Image (spheres, helix red, strand yellow):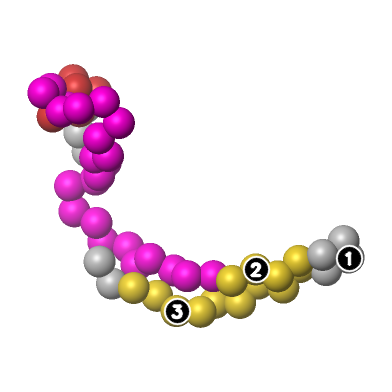
């Protein structure tokens, strides 16, 4: 895990608002969920996952 000073050093020279990934090696999968809701009910459906 990177320390605060290492994260600052990685951002030097980049324009404001540049997105940086906080982890060096991403090991988890991205899940896609669909939610339908109203005043009385919530339905959540797992649509799939993406390996990144």
Residue 6 in view here: no
Q: Residue at x 24, y 40 (%)?
A: 20
Query: Which mark is first along the chain, 1 or 2?
Result: 2
Would residue 32 be counted in the magenta stretch?
yes
Q: Earlier in the sequence, mark 1 or mark 3?
A: 1
| Residue 14, visible in the rendered structure | yes
**Residue 12 falls left or right of residue 44:** left
Mark 1 secondary-structure assignment: loop
Q: Name the quarter where the N terminus is drawn.
A: top left
Label 3 Cα neighbours within 10 Å, binned few <14 / some 14-19 / many ≥20: few
Residue 49 higher or lower than 12, as above or below = below
Q: CA distance from mark 2 to mark 1?
A: 14 Å
Q: Residue at x 76, y 66 (%)?
A: 37
| Magenta-highlighted residues | 11-33
Residue wearing tag 1:
40
Q: Are marks 1 and 3 in contact (CB under 8 Å)?
A: no
The answer to whether residue 36 is above or below residue 23 is below
Q: Quadrant location of the C terminus? A: bottom left
Q: Is residue 36 left or right of residue 49?
A: right
Query: Cα distance, mark 1 to mark 3?
Result: 26 Å
Q: Position of residue 22 (x, y in %)?
A: 27, 41
Give the residue pinned by disc 3: 48
Asked where in the image residue 2 lies, by quadrant, the reply is top left
Answer left or right for 34 relative to 31.
right
The one nearer the camera, 38 or 22, is: 38
The answer to which of 28 and 33 lies nearer the viewer is 33
Residue indicated by mark 2: 35
How many labels, in total?
A: 3
Q: Residue at x 12, y 22 (%)?
A: 12
Residue 15, how many percent across, how many down? 20, 27
Image position of 46 (left or right of 52): right
């Amino acid at each position: 895990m990177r320390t605060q000073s290492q994260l600052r050093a990685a951002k030097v020279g980049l324009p404001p608002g540049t997105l940086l990934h906080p982890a060096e090696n991403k090991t988890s999968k991205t899940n896609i969920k669909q939610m339908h809701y109203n005043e009385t009910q919530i339905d959540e459906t797992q649509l799939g996952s993406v390996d990144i």
